[in-house]
Image: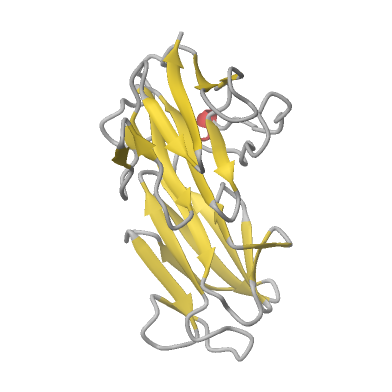
Amino acid sequence: MGKLVVSLDGVVIKEVQLTKDKTTLGRRPYNDIVIDNLAVSGEHAVLQVVGRDVFIEDINSTNGTYVNGKPIRKQLLTPSDTVEIGKYKLCYVSDDPPDLHESLRDSSTAPAGFAHTAPYMGGPSGFGGLGSSQPPSASIKVLNGAAAGRQVLLTKVVTTIGKPGVQVGSISRRPGGYVLAHVEGPTRPTVNGVPVEADPVPLSNGDIIELAGTRMQFVLG
């Protein structure tokens, strides 16, 4: 999986392996990562592991949580991202092989309300390893709303879909196929009417995804 390297003023204080599904961070002693500083809230943030994805979420902290200098509510972490809480810096280090990196900067083909996320690497167990063949190309076709009929190619390793602050999901390309994961929002996306729970859901050709009021069809090839 990965780890967080915690430092203060350039001096490394500790390294924390992310071995749990949820790792809490805060000033209170019952947190998994305890930072005893008044700038840190008692329950400040939580790190959630979904497959090989690691998300960090601010828990309504007083001073906020920053990733690479920008305030976040919930965000997918990528290798070398730096989480800033007060004067502390937590660098995310992944143990996954580096040759699965892929930049996701181009969002020009995404319909309104949709956005690509940051670089991603790795894949969950059960979907092949480095020696596995890559899955065929895929796309999602929007079935309703103002963007109905638009088809978005899934050319990146991870494509984030939805409306930030309302409901967000991510479609990840793995060595053995594509999976949909819940990222943000009180209501989980559905695949063929079944809600996506904690684990990512494998996608098959023709699956219907519903998210943030938008219906989409997953298309292979």
Work out whether residue 155 or residue 216 is closer to the camera in this orientation and state it: 216
Residue at the left extreme of this rendering: 126
* Rendered location of residue 123, percent (x, y): 39, 34
Work out whether residue 135 or residue 148 is closer to the camera in this orientation and state it: 148
Residue at the bottom extreme of this rendering: 38
Color theme of the render: secondary structure
Residue at the top extreme of this rendering: 221
Q: Is residue 162 visible?
A: yes
In which quadrant of the rendered view does residue 218 lie?
Answer: top left
In which quadrant of the rendered view does residue 129 lie?
Answer: top left
In which quadrant of the rendered view does residue 10 lie?
Answer: bottom right
* Rendered location of residue 197, percent (x, y): 31, 48
* Rendered location of residue 18, percent (x, y): 39, 60
Residue visible at 59% across and 23% down in the picture: 148
209 left or right of 126 in image? right
Residue visible at 56% across and 32% down in the picture: 101
70 left or right of 142 in image? right
Residue visible at 46% across and 58% down in the picture: 3
Residue visible at 41% across and 58% down in the picture: 48
* Rendered location of residue 145, percent (x, y): 59, 30
Q: Is residue 178 visible?
A: no
Q: How many marks overall?
A: 0
63 left or right of 132 in image? right
